[in-house]
Every structure is written in structure tokens, then in C-alpha cells.
Image (cartoon, rainbow, N blue to C red):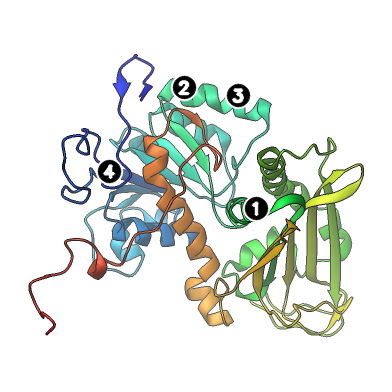
Amino acid sequence: MWRTPCGTARPRRCRSCGTSDGHARAGRRPGERRPPVTKVIQWATGGVGRAAIEAVLDHPELELVGAWVHSADKEGTDLGTLVGRDPVGVTATTDADALLALDADCVLYSPVFADTSVLRAILRSGKNVVTPLGWFYPRQRDREKFDAVCAEGGVTLHGTGIHPGGLTERLPLVLSALSGSITGIRAEEFSDIRTYGAPEVVRDWMMFGRKPEEAAGSTVAALLAGGYSQSVWMLADALGIDLDPDIRTTHDIAVATAPIESPIGIIEPGQVAAQHFRWEGTVDGEPVLTAAVNWLMGEADFDPPWRFGPGGQRFEVEVRGDPGCVLTLSGLHAHDLAEGARRNPSIVATAMNCVNAIPDVVAAAPGVRTYLDLPLPAGRAAHRLRRGGRDRGAGVRG
């Protein structure tokens, strides 16, 4: 058990059924009682936010109690209606103070960019936070600052997501348990960025369709490094690798050699059409731990002539050791531009990883908590397959 700032002992919940009253010792079977409901606020309703709203509504242990929106046009909109479902009786608001005063256990914080002043206010209001925007494995100084803020509210801050935030840390660590004498790890993304589903981000932040010198001189590499370098340090610390002090960042650009149609408009010859980023943890200057992304506007008319290769769009995790192994994940990318605009699988996966972490984050001790601190999370079954969700007396086989 951990103690709240006032010294009151807070029992941990059973991970089987979510209760915290010692039912296992009393002889009750897991599943006999409904788990206590965790109240959740969604902060921002972009692609990740909308997918998170759906996931919270479908999660048997979570209750959606509010959502913050940036646009006044969404003020008062029912959150069910916002995601194309029947009304749920909970509406969106632009009033952050009202949400901070609301009785809730956790905020899923997913605006386009993090505002640390807002994040601190949420934590100080006594609400746990799960976010895909960083804090995956902050370095000591940043972690100590947020540990102190978390202590004020008696709450937990956890960064998770997909890449970075999941495929860059958790899966490599899981695979590493199959190997010994590990000499390297690589986690790499290969994505057709035309299907991302957020044209303004692709154009204004990722710098596609711009001049190469604009992209090379932008802040995007530094912003991305803030997340991916945390992934590299987490792997190093978990595996016991003594890295050189600095993470090496590489940013390469390919330009269009012919007009390329895209959701941000025509990318003209000479404009940015593909980008490679690599973040490498080195030992004596040699790369040992690598996180990488390959973002391409299709596979034609580039200089250099980059391609996805036979594997197509995918995520890869490689562990070099005894034995070594490579895991390739497909299905997390949209098949076409229409699907990407409607419901991009990688965006949904980002939201799901956040939502599925909420029960363990709420049960954790106050402070910044990473994959190295929390239990392995799991998704939840479809409603029709859940315990108690079927009439077991009907349709007897015989």
C-alpha cells in the first residue's frame, strides 16, 4: 500500500477484478463483483482524443465524465454525438477550470502540443494523467520536478502511446527477455504520411511540402528527440547499457522530382516529400540502441529514391543478441487516404494504449511512473465476450 499526502493508507486494487477490499483473501472469486468505476476526463478531441472517447465509453471499468475542447464550436456538444454515437449525456466544454473542479480520477491529456502549465494544474487538482505527449522516461531533473507536482496532488503521471511510447520501449523490452548477451536494439517506423489524417500537422509541423532548408532548420527534430531520446534511455537503463552521454540525432530529407498529390495539396518538385529521423544511443561512438521513423509521401518520384521495401508500411522491432529476433507489425496503418482521414489505426492504437493504462496508473503510487514501474497492461474484450455479458444458459450445445 502507498500513502496519500495526508498519511491515509490507500490499498491497491486487485488487477483481476479491480476491487480493493481484500476479496481474494475472503475467498471471493475474481469476476464476481463489478470493478469500481474510474472517472475519466478527455483533454482535447483531435484524432487521438476522439478515439480515446470511444475507448473509454467501451471500457467496462471506466466512466467518461467530461472533455475539454479548444474550439468554441464544440462547446456543449454531447461526447457521444462528437464521435458519431448516440448521446451519452456528457458534454464538451472550453472551461478548463470547471473540469479541474470536477470529481474525476484521471485525465487523458492529448492536445497537439503539451502545455506544461496546464498539465501541472491538472495534477495539482488531484487527477492522475495519462498522455502520449511525453514523460515516457524523463531524465532526472525533469522527473524530480514532476514528482514534486504529483506529490502535491497525490497522483501519478504516465507517458505512453505507440511510437514513441510503446513500440519503442515496451515491445523491445518484452522481446529482449528472449535473448542474452544483447548487443543492440532497433525500433523503426515505415509510414505513408499521406494517410496520417491531420493535414495541418503534416504541413505546418512536419514541414512536408516546404523547402528542404526550411525543414532542416525547423524545430521538428528537436521536438521529436524530446520523446524518442527518452525511449533510448529507458532501454539503456533497463538493459544495463552504459551509453555515451548524448543521443545522436540524424535527419535526412528527400525532395519530389515530379508533382505528388497529397492531402496538403500538390508537393512540387524540389519540395520536401520524405523524411528519415534516427535517434541513436552509442557506446564509444558506435550505435547500439536506435529509434527511427521513415515518413514518405507514397513511394514514387523522390530524390533520393527511398522506398518502404517489400514489407510495406510497418513497424519493426529488432533485438540483436543470443538469439536475435525481429518482430514486424502490420495492420497499424491506414490502407488509403480515405481510411486515414476517417479512422487511422495508428491513431486509434495510440489512444487505446493510453486508455488501457488508466486503471494501473490510478492504482499506482504518486509520481512519474513509466513502463519500468507499472504492471503490464491489457486491453478489454468486446462486450459480447465479457464475463456476465452472455446468457450462458441459452443455446446449449448438444
For the residues carrying marks 4 and 1, which lies nearer the camera in this image?
1
Q: Give the distance between the C-alpha atoms of the residues marked 1 and 2, in whole angstroms.
A: 33 Å
**Mark 2 — residue?**
151
| 35 displayed left or right of 366 | left
Q: Is residue 279 above or below residue 190?
A: above
Q: Give the distance between the C-alpha atoms of the residues marked 2 and 3, in whole angstroms.
A: 10 Å
Q: Give the distance between the C-alpha atoms of the residues marked 4 and 1, in whole angstroms.
A: 30 Å
**Upstream in the sequence, badge 2 or badge 4?**
4
**Mark 4 — residue?**
18
Q: Position of residue 262 (x, y in %)?
A: 68, 79
Say what amino acid the circle numbered 1 marks: Ser
Question: Which image quadrant is residue 152 in?
Answer: top left
Say what amino acid the circle numbered 4 marks: Gly
Check contact, mark 4 vs mark 1: CB within 8 A. Answer: no
Question: Which image quadrant is residue 126 in?
Answer: top left
Q: Nearer the viewer, residue 328 or 58?
A: 328
Q: Is residue 42 above or below residue 139?
A: below
Q: Position of residue 132 (x, y in %)?
A: 54, 49
Q: Residue at x 68, y 79 (%)?
A: 312
| 389 displayed left or right of 211 | left
| 298 displayed left or right of 128 | right
The quarter of the rendered structure image containing the N terminus is top left
**Upstream in the sequence, badge 4 or badge 1?**
4
SS at badge 1: helix
The label on residue 144 is 3
**Upstream in the sequence, badge 2 or badge 3?**
3
| 355 displayed left or right of 22 | right
Q: Nearer the viewer, residue 113 or 225?
A: 225
For the residues carrying marks 1 and 3, which lies nearer the camera in this image?
1
SS at badge 3: helix
The label on residue 176 is 1
